[in-house]
Image (tube, helix red, strand yellow):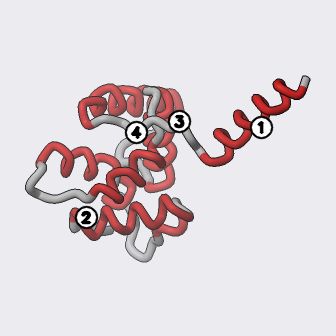
Amino acid sequence: MHKVTRILAVVLILAIFGCGQNVAPIASSEAIAQSMMNIAAKKGYSSPLTSKQAVEVLTQGFDDSGYSYSATLRKFSSEGVSFGDPEKYKFTAFMLMPLMVMKKGDRLENYYSGDDLKAVKELSRMTQIVN
């Protein structure tokens, strides 16, 4: 019984700290985009999406493809992004889609919080993609 308790504790720690979250490789962008289109269609969203819808569809599209939007944002933010790596830059721009559809006066804090907010702000600075 003691062994089961330890296993449950490890599982709980992994769940709390997000260990095992899969960072999406750049090559996954087409699969994620297809998933996002399917999700938007199922939800009845029309183009252009609102920032809230874009974050929701991105998050679910990454999840449905076996990746974590949040983990990918944070990983790219910590690694850095530049114009010198056009594929990584394009994938980052794809992840920052909600910024591109934000309405004037809207705030990132309405859609992101904590480490995700920090990562989005850093990626926005690196790529010069701003709302």
Point out the tag, 1 or 4, that comes first from the N-terminus.
1
* Image quadrant in which you'd find residue 119: bottom left
Query: If the image is split into quadrants, where does the N terminus sit?
Result: top right
* Circle 4 residue: 23
* Circle 1 residue: 9
Nearer the observer: mark 2 or 1; the answer is 1
Q: Residue furthest right?
A: 1
Q: Where 17 sits versus 103, above or below? A: above
The amino acid marked with disc number 2 is: Ile
Query: If the image is split into quadrants, where does the C terminus sit?
Result: bottom left
Circle 3: element type: loop
Question: Could you say which is closer to the camera, residue 30 or residue 104?
Answer: 30
- Mark 2 Cα shell of 10 Å, populated few (<14), some (14-19), many (≥20): some
Nearer the observer: mark 1 or 4; the answer is 1
Q: Where 25 sits versus 85, above or below? A: above
Question: Could you say which is closer to the camera, residue 22 or residue 47?
Answer: 22
* Circle 3 residue: 20
Point out the tag, 1 or 3, that comes first from the N-terminus.
1
Q: Where 34 sits versus 86, above or below? A: above
Circle 4: element type: loop
Gap in angstroms between the C-alphas marked 4 and 2: 21 Å
- Mark 3 Cα shell of 10 Å, populated few (<14), some (14-19), many (≥20): few
